[in-house]
Image (tube, rainbow, N blue to C red):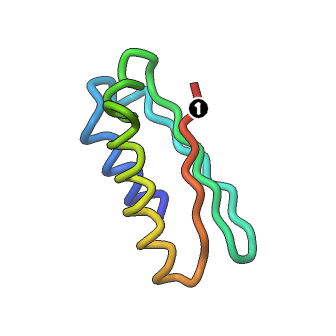
């Protein structure tokens, strides 16, 4: 799941080296913390959070296949 999220995020940002994704795995849940450069945060979140919402929807669909719940957090 982390690899899929990383592919999505790196395709959106300009500074690909600053992308950092921390995965905290539980029994039935996964928390993914995304950190990007300050200049790229707007690109990842999008107007009114539309891109962030779409990313969360995609990740929830991937997690459902594995029988887990996922939370995607964008860290400043």
9 or 59: nearer the viewer: 59
* Residue at the extreme top of the image, as rendered: 39
> What residue is at 25 percent from the left and 41 percent from the top?
11
Q: Position of residue 76 (x, y in %)?
A: 57, 24
Label 1: which residue? Answer: 75
Q: Position of residue 69 (x, y in %)?
A: 60, 71
Q: Position of residue 74 (x, y in %)?
A: 54, 37
* Residue at the extreme right of the image, as rendered: 27
In the picture, residue 51 is in which quadrant?
top left
In the picture, residue 68 is in which quadrant?
bottom right
> What residue is at 40 percent from the left and 37 percent from the top?
49
Neighbours of disc 1 within 10 Å: few (<14), some (14-19), many (20+): few
- Measured along the vertical axis of the image, is residue 33 above or below residue 67? above
For label 1, the SS is: strand
Total labels drawn: 1
> What residue is at 33 percent from the left and 24 percent from the top?
15
26 or 59: nearer the viewer: 59
10 or 70: nearer the viewer: 70
Q: Position of residue 14 (x, y in %)?
A: 27, 25
> What residue is at 32 percent from the left and 51 percent from the top?
7
Q: Is residue 12 left or right of residue 20?
A: left
- Measured along the vertical axis of the image, is residue 6 above or below residue 49? below
Q: Is residue 27 left or right of residue 52?
A: right
């Amino acid at each position: 799941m982390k690899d899929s999220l990383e592919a999505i995020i790196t395709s959106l940002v300009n500074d690909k080296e600053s992308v950092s994704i921390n995965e905290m795995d539980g029994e039935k849940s996964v928390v993914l913390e995304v950190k990007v450069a300050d200049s790229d945060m707007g690109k990842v979140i999008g107007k009114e959070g539309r891109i962030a919402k779409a990313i969360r929807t995609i990740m929830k669909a991937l997690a459902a296949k594995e029988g887990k719940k996922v939370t995607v957090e964008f860290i400043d």
